[in-house]
Image (cartoon, rainbow, N blue to C red):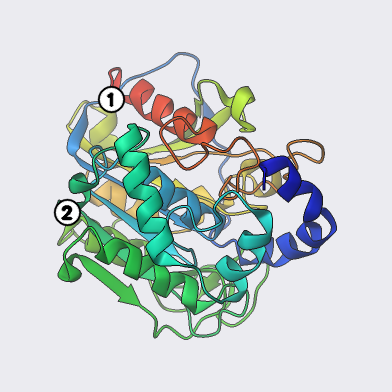
Amino acid sequence: MTRADNVADGASMGMRGLLPLVAILITACGGSDEPTQTEETVTYNIDSTRISVSGVSSGAMMATQLHVAHSSLFNGAALLAGGPWFCAQASMQTALGPCMKGGEIGVDKLVASAKQAEADGSIDALASLEGDRAWVFHATLDAAMSARASQATVAFYNEFMPEDSIQYVGDVEATHGFPTLETGAACNEMAEPYLNACNYDAAGNLLAALHGKLEARVDASGTLQEFAQPGADDATMLENALLYVPKACAAGDACGLHVALHGCLQSTAYIGDAFAAGAGYNEWAEANRMIVLYPQVASSKLAPLNPMGCWDWWGYTEESYATKSGPQIKVIKATMDALAGRSL
């Protein structure tokens, strides 16, 4: 079945099914300061040995796609309420069915697809995953995304990574959202911007899982600003990403880079800087010399159908969406390169 057929067949179902996907899209806490618009492109001293990615819900799906496609670049991925690489297999029906509601995902088939993509040169060598780390999170009260999807993610990564490199967190009593220490709605309440005060620091836990022991978090006294996303129009993305730059990184120190991906209805078009300012990444980034890039996806009510601003994890841009030639993956990589002033 082609991508066009999938969109047509799943149109009415998709609109309803994406509502929970939206609500499930987690992360984001309100920030009061407006992002600062930079007038010229500034590059940073990026430490290429400390590059990682995380995402929530549709952002988690994109995070694993980005990780697998560019495994030689990233040293780890953290996924909150997401499924394995290529879970939907270019089908909206599969996305809304097994990947979200549970059922047989078929990890063996996904592994075979990854090996074929490797042979085609459309993703990096799968051996690059062997030294990486993965952090997979599924909240106990999450009724929007099946735990089986997160468990399938662990099974997929187990094919390419040592078991002790994968951490599964499934015992946090929270709803579908991004858990924080004290910011957001009640821990059991799904409410915009889908950030939940659970006395659980998801940002700190995932960064430590991916990068090892961290210096204690401090106030985020650096700069949250806009940064252009090259080629965004061709990938159904917004013109600018958000970028958090710690003071030391702005002064030229070598800094790691973490890519944090919002979920549906969580781009700046919907909630401003709430995700970037409040999820908790920036406080850890300031203390640990780590720039945080917050890419931004756009919504589309016509073709390609993406009315709620979700990342492409079922093929609404094109069938290569989960590979290095996927339009949104290309834009994120180009944005990272622009930050470094070189090809990472």
Q: Nearer the viewer, residue 98 or 243?
A: 98
Q: Residue 122: x, y in percent?
A: 37, 33
Q: Which structural element holds mark 1?
A: loop
Does 79 sit left or right of 274 as displayed? left
Give above or below for 182 relative to 121.
Answer: below
Residue sitting at 34 percent across and 63 percent down? Answer: 156
Q: For residue 218, what is the image quadrant?
A: bottom left
Q: Residue 309: x, y in percent?
A: 67, 46
Q: Nearer the viewer, residue 52 or 34?
A: 52
Does 136 sit left or right of 72 as displayed? right
Residue sitting at 44 percent across and 36 percent down? Answer: 243
Q: Nearer the viewer, residue 104 or 204?
A: 104
Q: Give, as a three-letter code, the residue at label 1.
A: Tyr
Residue marked by disc 1: 44
Q: How many marks?
A: 2
Q: Which mark is residue 130?
A: 2
